[in-house]
Image (cartoon, rainbow, N blue to C red):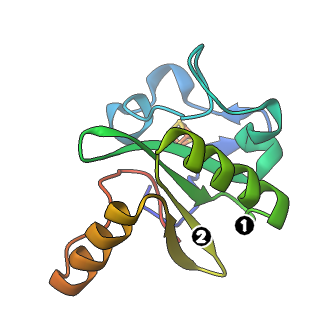
Amino acid sequence: MKPGVRCHFVRDSGCSIYETRPDSPCRQFECGWVGSDSPFPDSFKPTKLGVIVIKTTWRGQLAYRLAFGGRDLDAGELEWMMNFSRQTGRPFFYEKAGETLGYGPQAFIEDMQTKIQRGIPLFESHAASR
Ligand code: SF4
């Protein structure tokens, strides 16, 4: 089990060792789409979207990472996220052709540019990257 590689316990029906799956990353992972407070529509369910919604933080507030799960967001889905970000002030990361991009308030963009210059990871997450 390692980032960017499909877990060998995955079956068509789901996790084949679900009851005994490891604590990290499996039990610690919190899907950003699930939950009564989820702002995302049904169409953003990762198995439908092909993109995994992962909660992260920026300056102590909620932010999201939309990680490759088989495909990238299409133009309409990305527009939904951008509208959501403008309405809530929550920034997000997304992937396009293997590149990680970000969208959010100007201060978020500036913070990310500073991190890139200093070689600091853009986000903290145990979820896989391509
Ligand atoms: S829950 Fe963990 S062990 Fe099970 S399929 Fe997913 S990554 Fe693999």
The furthest residue to the bottom = 117
User: Which sits earlier in the primary sequence, circle 2 or circle 1?
Assistant: 1
What residue is at 35 percent from the left and 51 percent from the top?
Answer: 125
Mark 2 crowdedness (10 Å alpha carbons): few <14, some 14-19, many ≥20: some
Residue at (47, 45) in percent of width and height: 89
Q: Is residue 22 above or below residue 37?
A: below
Q: Quadrant of the N terminus?
A: bottom left
Q: Is residue 13 above or below residue 121?
A: above
- The amino acid marked with disc number 1 is Asp
Q: Secondary structure at mark 1?
A: loop
State left or right for residue 58 relative to residue 39. Answer: left
Q: Image quarter for residue 73? A: bottom right
**SS state under label 2:** strand
Q: What is the number of the mark on residue 95?
A: 2
Residue 122 drawn at (x, y percent):
32, 66
Asked if the residue at label 1 sits under 8 Å from ligand 1, the reply is no
What residue do we see at 56% from left, 53% from top? Answer: 7
Q: How many marks?
A: 2
Residue type for callout 2: Glu
Write down the residue under mark 1: 72
Q: Do callouts 2 and 1 mark residues in contact (Cβ within 8 Å)?
A: yes
> How crowded is the residue under tag 1: few (<14 C-alpha within 10 Å), some, or many (20+)?
many
